[in-house]
Amino acid sequence: MRAIPGRESPGEWRVPVLDIRFATARSASGAVAVVVPSGSPDAALDLLKLGPADLAECAAFLEDVEHSGSAGTVHTLPRPGRKPSRLLFAGIGDGDEAGWRSAGAALARKARTETSLRVLAAHDTPPEAVRGLAEGLWLASYRFSLADTEPDPLRRVTVALPATGETTGALEQARAVVTATVLARDLTNMPSDRKTPAWFARQVVKAAAGVPGLTVEVREPSYLAAQGFNAILAVGRGAATERGPRLVEMSWRPRGAKRHVVLVGKGITFDTGGICIKPTSNMRLMRKDMGGAAAVIGATLAAAAMRLPVRVTALAPLAENALGADAMRPGDVVTHYGGLTSEILNTDAEGRLVLGDAMAYAVRRLRPDVMIDLATLTGAQGVALGKRTAAMYSYSDTLAGALATAAAASGESVWRMPLSDDYADELDGDVADLVNSTDIGAGSLLAALYLREFTGPLRDRWAHFDMSSPAWSDSNDGELAKGATGWGVRTLTRWLETAS
Ligand code: BES
Ligand code: MN
Ligand code: ZN
């Protein structure tokens, strides 16, 4: 399905490669899946083209297992010695895209050990259903391992629909968004011994290679110093030189684009907390602290793969927040790109520091129409909204509304939070413009207010996502595989599809 972008040497890791295609001719062997809508379990049985006795057996089976058709439920009927040899009944709920996505994910898990799977579908199945099914199948069959493990036997899924412009178009949309999500997951799952800022930058260069209209620039510490990206440098200064900071700029510039969107993603390749070191349990998963950067890179790649008519620039400020003899200290003052100063009260509030530089650069140099940033920014996000729902902040009802719609359509969850001005003076510094941390609670909101200071004239055309917890899943759950989720690729890509 894709070149493996993160792999630096053959066999370093494997991902499942599932070939999804359309074919109307019946296949001789393998398992067959039938979709079951909510409330009308028998509706889909016609598609099976079985004799009356077999049909009666299926109907009795569905009644027996009490198949309600709810999205994501799969029941398997073995039929030894007969064809098809196994029937998988997959609920699609109301039959909307989300229902098909759940069905695809559940089928990918249930059919892992089959050698092939054929999914029957009515001839009037809409393209959104195809997109949902393919996204579910692909995303749920994702695995990340550095061990030399065997991939699952399931290699091919055929969908019993003709390959028309609409169906293949939907499949290609799914492929673009899944490829980008898989890249974001791979980058985020990669342990931080390998995942240095330079390594991350190299993967971005590789992923963009050969895509027409897509360019990548990687800025090294000497450039960052000359241009005044002092906060990115400060955060990265505790790390070894080979693990020093980078600023990656990826740009998709289609001809004739009217709108320019800048996406900024937090790229902390590991967050120890710095001198304000984290306790072990809080540090364990901090290789995911570049999930925002991975998502904005992924979404930009997807925009290019879909050839969306909107200009997109992704900025990934990358640094390892380590302890070291030269690490930034509490009380230090840094001058951001563009001149704002921050007093570092807590070296563990490093994400907003690197984002401040990148956002100030975006505003001054790229002059976008819209700016969106994504960051695993605060533990407080998870306290407020839990594992699956990201916090969204924006002054624009229109932008927030469009992003919420895109999130819902793509299967990701967001909740809009307030940018309460009352707390803003808490961020005033004694010896600098800003302090990078406060003690008054509302941690996710205050981080958003801090970032606001770097939006300049874009304040009303800016949205911020705090996706600290949703960046990771503790279990296989629907289309999410245990580990990195690639959160944000789907929401951003959906939104970009409508953002021209
Ligand atoms: N990367 C963390 C936030 C985080 C926590 C992400 C848990 C994912 C899961 C961030 O850099 C951080 O440490 N934030 C501090 C901010 C505080 C010092 C103001 C936090 O949330 O405690
Ligand atoms: Mn931190
Ligand atoms: Zn962090």
Image (cartoon, grey):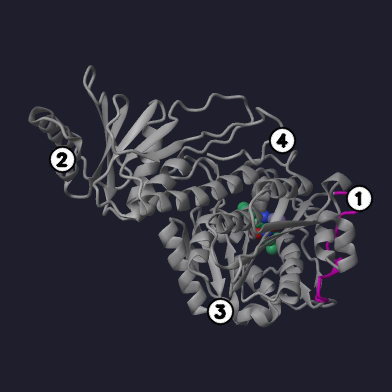
Residue 435 part of the magenta segment: no
Mark toward the start of the polypeptide (4 vs 1): 4
**Dot label at residue 46:** 2
Give the residue number, with chain letter if any, for mark 1: 325
The residue lying toward the viewer, choosing from 21 and 475, is 21
Cα distance in 3D space between marks 2 and 4: 49 Å
Cβ atoms at labels 4 and 1 below 8 Å apart? no
Three-letter amino acid code of the residue under disc 2: Asp
Q: Secondary structure at mark 2?
A: helix
The quadrant in which residue 90 appears is top left
Three-letter amino acid code of the residue under disc 3: Tyr
Mark toward the start of the polypeptide (1 vs 3): 1
Give the residue number, with chain letter if any, for mark 3: 395
For disc 4, the neighbor class at 10 Å (few under 14, some 14 to 19, many from 20) is few
Residue at image x 67%, y 47%?
286
Which secondary structure dominates the residues rendered in magenta?
loop
Lateral position of residue 102 relative to residue 240, left or right = left
Q: Which residues are magenta?
A: 324-340
Q: Nearer the viewer, mark 1 or mark 3?
A: 3
**Dot label at residue 8:** 4
**Residue 443 percent across, percent down from the top left:** 62, 66
The residue lying toward the viewer, choosing from 477 and 103, is 103
Cα distance in 3D space between marks 1 and 2: 71 Å
Q: Secondary structure at mark 4?
A: loop
Residue at image x 51%, y 38%?
142
